[in-house]
Image: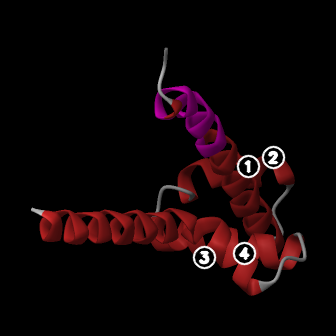
């Protein structure tokens, strides 16, 4: 029988891929709104701009806020969730290690 973690791995990959597409659309909408480019050119440009760390994040946050009407916090969390998840995982691992040492 598979462990729960092994069964969740495909779900995590699908969720990560879906979030990537949402971020790509936010970047494209941000480019389209800021530069006034047609949608087709914005989506082509988004494929390249998304990989430039600060520029892609700025365009995506702007697109989610200005085009979709999201709050600045929600738009920032759309692109910052991997950092938040990393901090949470690090805190959990550190706590587990701390209490694991005390019991030995």
Quick one: label 2 or label 3, which is nearer the N terminus?
Answer: 2
The reply to whether residue 95 is visible in this rendering is yes
Which corner quadrant of the image does residue 75 belong to?
bottom right
Quick one: label 4 or label 3, which is nearer the N terminus?
Answer: 3
Residue that numbered label 2 is attached to: 40
Badge 1 density bin: few <14, some 14–19, many ≥20, Cα 10 Å: many
Q: Which residue is at 71% across, 84% downward?
A: 73
**Which quadrant, please, contains the C terminus?**
bottom left
The mark closer to the camera, 4 or 2, is 4
Residue 22 lies, in percent from the top left, at 73, 52
Check disc 3 and report its element: helix, strand or loop: helix
**CA distance separating discs 1 and 4:** 19 Å
Badge 2 density bin: few <14, some 14–19, many ≥20, Cα 10 Å: few
CB-based contact (under 8 Å), mark 4 and mark 2: no
Check disc 1 and report its element: helix, strand or loop: helix
Toward the viewer: 60 or 91? 91
Quick one: label 1 or label 4, which is nearer the N terminus?
Answer: 1
Mark number displayed over residue 58: 3
Q: Which residue is at 41% across, 71% downward?
A: 87
**CA distance separating discs 1 and 2:** 5 Å
Residue that numbered label 4 is attached to: 75
**CA distance separating discs 1 and 3:** 16 Å
Magenta part of the protein: which range? Answer: 5-16
**CA distance separating discs 4 and 2:** 23 Å
Residue 95 lies, in percent from the top left, at 31, 71
Mark number displayed over residue 43: 1
**CA distance separating discs 4 and 3:** 10 Å
The mark closer to the camera, 2 or 3, is 3
The reply to whether residue 35 is visible in this rendering is no
């Amino acid at each position: 029988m598979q462990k729960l973690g092994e069964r969740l791995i495909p779900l995590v990959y699908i969720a990560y891929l879906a979030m990537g597409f949402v971020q790509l659309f936010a970047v494209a909408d941000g480019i389209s709104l800021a530069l006034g480019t047609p949608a087709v050119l914005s989506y082509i440009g988004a494929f390249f701009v998304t990989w430039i760390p600060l520029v892609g994040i700025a365009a995506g946050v702007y697109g989610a806020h200005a085009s979709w009407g999201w709050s600045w916090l929600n738009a920032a969390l759309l692109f910052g969730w991997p950092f938040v998840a990393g901090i949470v995982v690090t805190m959990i691992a550190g706590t587990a290690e701390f209490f694991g040492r005390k019991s030995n």
